[in-house]
């Protein structure tokens, strides 16, 4: 893997107050456009998107390299934050006031054409989305669900911790118990002919902890 600079900002935090500063961003190429001799890419990470500009007058080799970028390429970009020209401000993006004019570009990983667009408005069946779940998880709505779930877990954990509860992670496998439900058995690798069972309920562990 090529060497690259550690990012100094995320793709969702650049504002007009950062104009004139040199930043390094890393993320996925969301889209690439060629307009008026310039190459524009929307660089995306889990925090948002930032538009990056490659100008052949400033660096021809870099401009040509940017022309090879495709959707979902993973790249590292270093450049100067500049205000967008009049009439080019995108009010629909929180970073829409600024561009990053690139001075360095490193392709960290190439990608094949995705089976569906990494966006919320997609025409893909559930089977395709599940088959390529690692791509589906990059979509904004799915990502926000993961973040919301994480925050809810943290909220519940903090609440019970403040009440002096102790969180205990009980074993996933245990001895089979004589209950009515059918056991799901897992063979033991170290004791031939022996099996573990998936717990049917937390009752056994709860009783041990209560004692």
Image: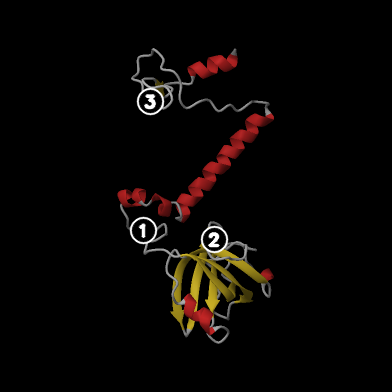
- Above or below — where is 8 with respect to 205? below
Question: What residue is pinned by disc 2?
Answer: 48
Which is nearer the eye, 186 or 181? 186
Residue 22 picture quarter: bottom right
Can residue 16 be seen from the camera position used here?
no
Cα–Cα span, label 1 and label 3: 43 Å
Question: What residue is pinned by disc 1?
Answer: 122
The residue at 63%/26% (across/down) is: 166
Disc 2 and disc 1 in contact, CB within 8 angstroms:
no
Cα–Cα span, label 2 and label 1: 19 Å
- Helix, strand or loop status at disc 2: strand
Of circles 1 and 3, the one toward us is 3
Residue 210 x %, y % = 59, 15
Give the total number of marks visible in the rendering. 3
Residue 49 x %, y % = 53, 64
Disc 3 and disc 2 in contact, CB within 8 angstroms:
no
- Helix, strand or loop status at disc 1: loop
- Above or below — where is 141 with respect to 48? above
Cα–Cα span, label 3 and label 2: 46 Å
Question: What residue is pinned by disc 3?
Answer: 187
Residue 171 x %, y % = 50, 25
């Amino acid at each position: 893997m090529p060497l690259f600079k550690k990012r100094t900002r995320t793709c969702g935090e650049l504002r007009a107050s950062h104009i004139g500063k040199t930043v390094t961003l890393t993320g996925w190429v969301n889209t690439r456009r060629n307009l008026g001799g310039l190459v524009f890419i929307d660089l995306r990470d889990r925090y948002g998107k930032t538009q990056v500009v490659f100008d052949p007058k400033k660096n021809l080799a870099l401009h040509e390299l940017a022309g090879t970028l495709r959707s979902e390429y993973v790249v590292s970009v270093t450049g100067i934050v500049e205000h967008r020209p009049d009439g080019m401000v995108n009010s629909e993006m929180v970073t829409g006031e600024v561009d990053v004019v690139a001075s360095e570009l490193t392709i960290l990983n190439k990608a094949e054409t995705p089976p569906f667009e990494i966006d919320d408005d997609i025409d893909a069946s559930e089977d395709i989305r599940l088959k390529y779940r690692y791509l589906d998880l990059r979509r904004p709505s799915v990502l926000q669900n993961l973040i919301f779930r994480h925050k809810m877990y943290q909220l519940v954990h903090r609440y019970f911790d403040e009440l002096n509860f102790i969180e205990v992670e009980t074993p996933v496998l245990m001895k089979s118990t004589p209950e009515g439900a059918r056991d799901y058995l897992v063979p033991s690798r170290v004791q031939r002919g022996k099996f573990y069972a998936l717990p049917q309920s937390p009752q056994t562990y709860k009783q041990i902890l209560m004692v």
